[in-house]
Image (cartoon, rainbow, N blue to C red):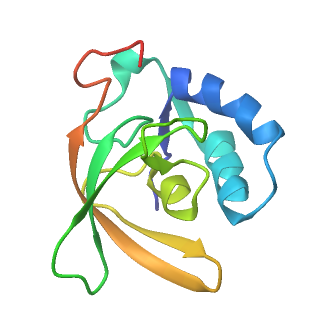
Amino acid sequence: MTAQPIVSSLDFDRLQPLLSGAYIDAAVLRLRALLDQARKVSPRRVPPDVVTMRSRVQVRHAGDDEPDTYELTYPDSDSGGLSVLSPLGAALLGAREGATVDCAGGRVSRRVTVERIEYQPERERHFDQ
């Protein structure tokens, strides 16, 4: 049995309006399902091993020797990070360290493992991020 995903209430409140006006694709459908199923918790109560918005995450793509690092961002961010509306971004939100997630993009499905959360705003007590 899979544990109920956890999402910061702040992330939930910021993502809901973005999804209502977004082009419907697999990533948006995945995010909507995640937000519908997730247990919403205050930012102060987010476990330190959960990927939240603006987390910097080290992941390993199946078959790759070296991990990649991404910052999970909102689609309007100019930081050059990984948009939560991308297939990989949608798959990472709410994932936990050590988890392997499937992400479908176009005609290709990929598996990635969350190796480490290098930075999570809630863990660092950056609640206004």
Q: Where does the image place residue 32, in percent across and percent down from the top left? A: 71, 47
Q: Residue at x 32, y 61 (%)?
A: 99
Q: Residue at x 43, y 46 (%)?
A: 80
Q: Residue at x 41, y 37 (%)?
A: 52
Q: In the picture provided, is 90 more to the left or to the right than 1?
A: right
Location of residue 109 with respect to 40 vertically, above or below: below
Residue 121 in the image, given as x and y percentages of width and height:
31, 26
Residue 67's place in the image compared with 30, above or below, is: below
Q: Nearer the viewer, residue 58 or 6?
A: 58
Q: Residue 39's image quarter?
A: top right
In the image, taking residue 2 as reference, residue 108 lies left or right, namely right
Does residue 94 appear to the left or right of 71 in the view shown? right
Q: In the image, is residue 2 above or below residue 107? A: above
Query: What residue is drawn where x is 76% and y is 62%?
Result: 25
Quarter placement of the C terminus: top left
Q: Is residue 84 left or right of residue 123?
A: right
- What percent of the width, then of the height, locates residue 89? 50, 54
Q: Give the percent coordinates (x, y) of residue 123.
A: 24, 25
Determine whether 4 is above or below 99 in the image: above
How many numbered marks does the figure carry?
0
Question: In the depicted view, which residue is nearer to us: 70 or 9?
Answer: 70
